[in-house]
Amino acid sequence: MDTALQSMIANMPEKTGKSLGAWKKILRSKSFQKHSEAVNFLKNEHGLTHGFANTIVHLSKDQEASSDDLLTAQYKGKEHLLPIFERVRKAVEGLGDDVTITPKKTTVSFIRKKQFALINPATKTRLDLGLKLVGEPLTTRLENSGPFGTMCTHRVRLEKPEDVDKELLSWLTQAYEKAR
């Protein structure tokens, strides 16, 4: 992603009143046949400039197609882990309208102004959830970041949907709140 586009996305909440993730949710709630229909909707109904509207529509389309492909590739042969991922994703989406979920080749990033969590299918039986919790002490469950290195400060191993419990949700919320 080039610097100008990154800057536009970073300035979006201030300039448009919503994050890219929030605008994508709005577009997903509607059905548009053409790119121009979605752009005009954002301009006419929400008062966005053409530049922001066009960028939001482009990024929404690009991410939808590639997100599905990236997730399919990540979970190939590990489809039984998807219910765990979906629980984490649903919890993250509930944290606020300013969350952007970005699938990559091997991971999915959860970003506010900064990345605050990262998840990937680490093995055929486990997901690793990386969290950015600077200053939080390690515990038996809240481990050192391990393979995430400096991208996260901690890691939680998730083997079943029930592992997405109150304790984990508390850590996700803390990481989200620190990513302002």
Image (cartoon, rainbow, N blue to C red):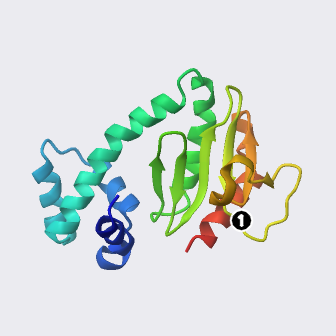
Q: 14 or 131: nearer the eye?
A: 131
Give the image quarter of residue 17. Answer: bottom left
Look at the image and tell me in which quarter the C terminus lies: bottom right
Q: 138 or 47: nearer the eye?
A: 138
Residue 163 image offset from top left, x and y in percent: 75, 41
Report the residue at 47% width, 44% height from top. 104
Q: Residue furthest top?
A: 77
Report the residue at 45% width, 63% height from top. 97
Q: 171 or 95: nearer the eye?
A: 171
Residue neighbourhood size for the residue with mark 1, other residues' Cα within 10 Å, grouped as few (<14), some (14–19), many (≥20)? many
In the displayed structure image, the side of residue 27 where residue 33 appears, left or right: left
Report the residue at 70% width, 47% height from top. 147
In the displayed structure image, the side of residue 139 where residue 76 appears, left or right: left
Q: Which residue is mark 1?
A: 133
Residue 137 image offset from top left, x and y in percent: 85, 65
Give the image quarter of residue 66. Answer: top left
In the displayed structure image, the side of residue 9 where residue 55 appears, left or right: left
Q: Residue furthest bottom?
A: 14
Residue 174 image offset from top left, x and y in percent: 68, 66
Report the residue at 31% width, 48% height from top. 28
Look at the image and tell me in which quarter the N terminus lies: bottom left
What residue type is disc 1 on? Leu
Q: Residue furthest right?
A: 140
Residue 156 image offset from top left, x and y in percent: 75, 48
In the displayed structure image, the side of residue 147 where residue 135 appears, left or right: right
Q: 20 or 122: nearer the eye?
A: 122
